[in-house]
Amino acid sequence: MDAAHAPDSLDTLDSLREQGGSRHGGGRVQALERAIALLNAVSASAPEGRPAAELAAECGLNRATAWRLLATLEHHAMVERDPVGNRYTIGSAVSRLASTASVEGLIRRSHDVLERLCRETGETANLAVARRLGLTYVDEVVPPAVLSARWLGRQVPIHATSAGKALLAWQTPGEVDALLSGPLAEYTETTRTGRRALHAELAEVRAQGYSVSVGELEPQLYGVAAPVLDADDHPIAVVSVWGPRDRVPESRFAQLGAQARRAAQEIRERLAPGA
């Protein structure tokens, strides 16, 4: 902390008095509860952020205690301080923790649905989420008697898979353009690289409730996918079923698409009951 923002002597005395009791009842740690209160106050101040003095006042802390806690949180990237305005905002570590927690919770709530979908279809069932550079498969169930490539953890282009198109179909046109900024790579002869044709297909996907891929990323891989929607009908994940062309021909798309839709709806109801 720079000298211009160092606590005064009265704050220091108040801080020392505060240290007389380090725990609340029930085993709770007072310093940690104060840090959490500060984090909540910083979060509530988004996006502008707030200076330490205001955060201290809101949380009922003296400035010395607030400054030390904020400095510690800043060191661990839980908060960030604007050096010009000395305003605190939520740091990258919080975003990283939230992202990890949400994906882990999604996997826990959906894994048995994927297992059943895999068993009923006889094909690989995946769960994917959007990432900054594309789509990433975060869970996967493969039939035990089937030799299949593993896609878990793999990031794929969003325009060349059934999962990616299921995600895009429930975005606004502006969101679609943002996700597809830059040229669209052609991976096979069936990959759609024209934006007008892709937007037209996305409208069809939304109408039927599931998307398809006819060898658009790899020539022999065919599949279907359906989005997991939140309470506002915004896609938060995608369920997909895929396999080699001889086992997942286009004649199976309608049946597999309906099964993927039911699985996605079940996951949605687990995440947002009544949605």
Image (tube, helix red, strand yellow):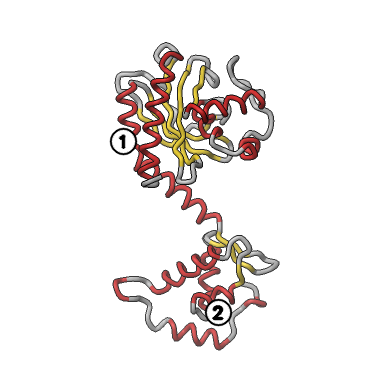
Figure check: 63 above or below 171:
below
Give coordinates of residue 150: x percent, y percent. 42, 26
Relative to residue 274, is residue 216 depicted above or below?
Answer: above
Residue 139 falls in image quadrant: top left
Residue at 46% from the left image edge and 14% from the top image edge: 250
Q: In the rendered view, does 59 fall on the left or right side of 47?
A: left
Residue that appears at 40% across and 43% down: 106
Viewer-side label of 1, 2: 1
Residue under label 2 = 63
Task: For the N terminus, give its image quadrant.
Answer: bottom right
- Residue lying furthest right in this view? 84
Q: Label 2, secondary structure: give it.
A: helix
Any mark on residue 182, and which? none
Image x and y of residue 2, in percent:
64, 73
Q: Please give left or right for residue 119 compared with residue 43 in the image.
A: left
Alpha-carbon span between mark 1 and mark 2: 50 Å
> How many C-alpha atoms fall within 10 Å of the one at disc 2: few (<14), some, or many (≥20)?
many
Q: Position of residue 211 (x, y in %)?
A: 49, 26
Kind of residue at badge 2: Arg
- Please indicate, yes or no, whether residue 16 appears anywhere in the rendered image: yes
For label 1, the residue is 112
Q: Using the image as rendered, state which of residue 165 and residue 3 is in the foreground.
A: 165
